[in-house]
Image: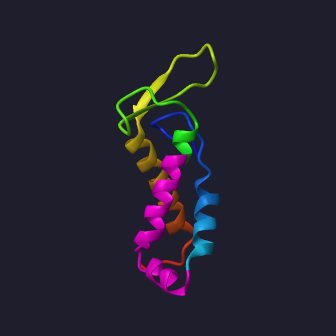
Amino acid sequence: MRLKTLPVDVNAKAIASGLLAMFDESERAVLRFGMLPAAKMECLEKQLGAHFRALGTDCGDGDKFFAILKAPNERCREFSMKALVSEALRAVTLELYAIGELVV
């Protein structure tokens, strides 16, 4: 899936499948009612942020803005890191709901 915040592809379905495989039975039971385990989702959010930070070089205001350099001659692109991580996390969450066995 291509994100809107920045033209970055995220394989949300694969991430969701891997995350779901790490859920224990109590977490799967909670997912059936549309709730996600907070600890695993917070960990995923941190990992997504670390992954996106590794793609480029900071050229803004700390965590607020970040830049990805696609090629040496290409301009720096600024965007909100929080918005990018939030969009990727939302995509993974929607995939979790799609592949989970929800009762609601």
Asked if the magenta segment contains residue 26, the reply would be yes
Color style of the picture:
rainbow
Q: In this view, does 70 lie to the left or right of 103?
A: right
Nearer to us in this view, 26 or 100: 26
Q: Where is residue 91 in the image (x, y as percent from the top left)?
A: 50, 54
Asked if the magenta segment contains residue 28, the reply would be yes
Nearer to us in this view, 16 or 33: 16
Q: Where is residue 59 in the image (x, y as percent from the top left)?
A: 44, 26
Q: Where is residue 45 in the image (x, y as percent from the top left)?
A: 46, 56
Residue lying at 47% horizontally and 38% vertically, measured from the top left:
4
Residue lying at 44% horizontally and 73% vertically, measured from the top left:
37
User: Looking at the image, is 87 positioned above or below residue 20?
Assistant: above
User: Looking at the image, is 44 positioned above or below residue 35?
Assistant: above
Residue lying at 58% horizontally and 63% vertically, measured from the top left:
16
Q: State which quarter of the image contains the C terminus.
A: bottom left
Residue lying at 58% horizontally and 67% vertically, measured from the top left:
19
User: Looking at the image, is 38 positioned above or below residue 77?
Assistant: below
Nearer to us in this view, 6 or 44: 44
Q: Is the magenta stretch mostly helix, strand or loop?
A: helix
Nearer to us in this view, 41 or 57: 57
User: Looking at the image, is 2 positioned above or below residue 100?
Assistant: above
Q: Read off the magenta span.
A: 24-50
